[in-house]
Image (cartoon, coloured by chain):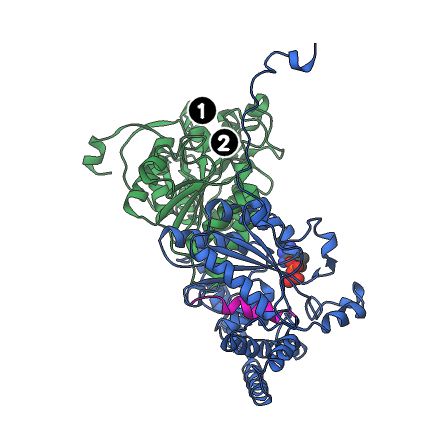
Chain colours: A green, B blue
Amino acid sequence: MTAAATLAAKPATMAQALQRAMRDAMAEDARVHVLGEDVGTLGGVFRVTDGLAKEFGEDRCTDTPLAEAGILGTAVGMAMYGLRPVVEMQFDAFAYPAFEQLISHVAKMRNRTRGAMPLPIVVRVPYGGGIGGVEHHSDSSEAYYMATPGLKVVAPATVADAYGLLREAIDCDDPVVFLEPKRLYWSKADWSPHPVEPIGRAVVRRTGRSATLITYGPSVPVCLEAAEAAKEEGWDLEVVDLRSLVPFDDETVCASVRRTGRAVVVHESTGFGGPGGEIAARVTERCFHHLEAPVLRVAGFDIPYPPPMLERHHLPGVDRVLDAVARLQWEA
Amino acid sequence: MTVQELPGAAAAYPAFTLRTDPAPLLPDTEPYRVLGLGTDSPLDPALMRRLYEGLVRGRRYNAQATALTKQGRLAVYPSSTGQEACEIAAALVLQEQDWLFPSYRDTLAAVARGLDPVEALTLLRGDWHTGYDPREHRIAPLCTPLATQLPHAVGLAHAARLAGDDVVALAMVGDGGTSEGDFHEALNFAAVWQAPVVFLVQNNGFAISVPLAKQTAAPSLAHKAVGYGMPGRLVDGNDAAAVHEVLGEAMRLARSGGGPTLVEAVTYRMEAHTNADDATRYRGDAEVEAWRAHDPVDLLERELTGRGLLDEETIRTVREGAETMAADLRARMNADPVLDPMELFAHVYAEQTSQLREQAAMLRDELEAGAGR
Ligand SMILES: Cc1ncc(C[n+]2csc(CCOP(=O)(O)OP(=O)(O)O)c2C)c(N)n1
């Protein structure tokens, strides 16, 4: 961050930083169009597109008919014609109707046309739990997207990354599924718009020597809190924020694990078939001789997302993270 | 207490008016026809000659492609034999800058638009998925997931209109595809946005084995247009002159800002679904023979000959041209395509991820070891 940017920093929420990212991108590049349900007049149900229709007109920020496959499918056509659509899916579970378009077209178009027709589309998905949402409003759907070659999958955890990564995603010539942790929408930081580490780079949010917590999105603040609490137990935990699940930054993750010799992967998504399995396998394959203990996972249970009054039992919290750290075979 | 005495009952019912008059949107109750009616309404001789040549070459192309499956040169071929009038008319109504959105059955339309047949058949030969640059030809990739190309056509047409460009998208789909959600969503978006799109449904009677009666309870597929607020047109899909006329009108409407049209062309799939299908399991010969009597190539040839617009000499020249095209296609398809397995990693992302680089290195090692053995 430049000195000037630091000086101008003001308190901002993640939602505001995301809005600013789209606004700045739209101002700089007339090819950037925003479309989705309620994104125009209302500014989106989370107000992330607030003011865009007013500033750029409804042709640039468009309230579409209510049909997710249609939204993403028309975005494909717009991108074929040279636009750079930014699509908003209203909630994680309501992105599913667009799945076929995403998997069969968005992810594959560059490859099937031998690179002739890449699709620079951003699919913004408010995702994850912790906001007391009723059924179908709290899914962590990243594993579906991660398993699809051709998509980049990004999840910011900080206000600065929300802006910087979304700008990057809009500039990116590949399609990006941009997962916005909805319980962090109202998280605040002193911030001014500035570029960040590129998509595909993980960042060490907290350095430590005892063990590495590998995490992303809504679980980053949980891990940072756990790392603070761990000091009492005498553990000095490192926290790696992946920021992007695809491309995956093996280098940063493995460098950290080689330093600490122990690792726990933390995410809200289900454990079975979730991202943690892939991450644990990658770390084990690459860092086996540095490991003092098996790589552990702290994940959501393998259950459909619970009703709001029970979700706190499901979401990985500080205690569950610390319990996992305690199981990293310290006695030896 | 009667209903009239209920509190609030006196308040006026909020005004409701129809948002558009449905009457002008309704299709005719019979497919529109031009040929074989015994009338002498004028036909454009040059256009008819182009249609005729296209149909004859198209029929030969279908036969050649089917033969190539038997020789193992194509993995599969969904033939448009019997549907050539639709395929050729669709290509001919397009202007240079317009876009075609074909399905897997529509390689002929792509070829008639000017695409090299070998490039059009790349998908079905299996050496890559799309054999051409869609932007260079303004032909979207041949689309296999049913109806999913329709919203693309709408989005592209919408983007072109926002840019003020004179571009119309023509999207092709089968009768079975009209049951898909993407068909509905595409038509709805197109009508709401008044996008310059023409939807051409080739109702060829079957979706693989399933007849139309199991697909829809609508009076006709063209009638579905009314529900979206766009005009529906019903046309004889074996009558090349009629299909060209109806599609041409729809294209002009779209071009002039009049929005989308849904055209249902009633035709028949003369061959099995693909070379891998056995049509005798679900339909009888009598039905096929009845349609053979209404063959699109014969229909046009008879009409044009009768009107003196086509002579023996021209027929021979056109047929010879078709044979030359087929021989050329056969020869070129008999050459083994040159494949580079390393290309598998080349186009997944703009830049290879570290994981793909590792996997590419692994395959390269395998290939080199194999070559050394
Ligand atoms: C989404 C989807 N479901 C199923 C299929 C398998 N499939 C391929 S062609 C076909 C029949 C399509 O019939 P129709 O739309 O009438 O077109 P036609 O093949 O007759 O040209 C089916 C079921 C598919 N390609 N896509």
Provide the chain ID for the residue under circle 1. Answer: A
Front label number (1 vs 2) = 2
Q: Which residues are magenta?
A: B82-95
Does the rendering let one see residue B54?
yes
**Dot 1 and dot 2 within a common chain:** yes
Q: Amino acid at mark 2?
A: Val
What residue sits right under mark 2 in the picture? A325
The front one of B303 and B155 is B303
Q: Amino acid at mark 1?
A: Glu
Q: Which residue is situated farthest in the bottom direction here?
A: B313
Are the residues flagged by discs 1 and 2 in contact, CB closer than 8 Å? yes
Q: Nearer the viewer, residue A69 or B41?
A: B41
**Residue A266: % across, % down:** 50, 35
Q: Is residue B242 left or right of residue A183?
A: right
On the rendering, which quadrant does ligand 1 occupy? bottom right
Asked if A120 appears above or below B31 in the picture, the reply is above
Quick one: SS at disc 2? helix
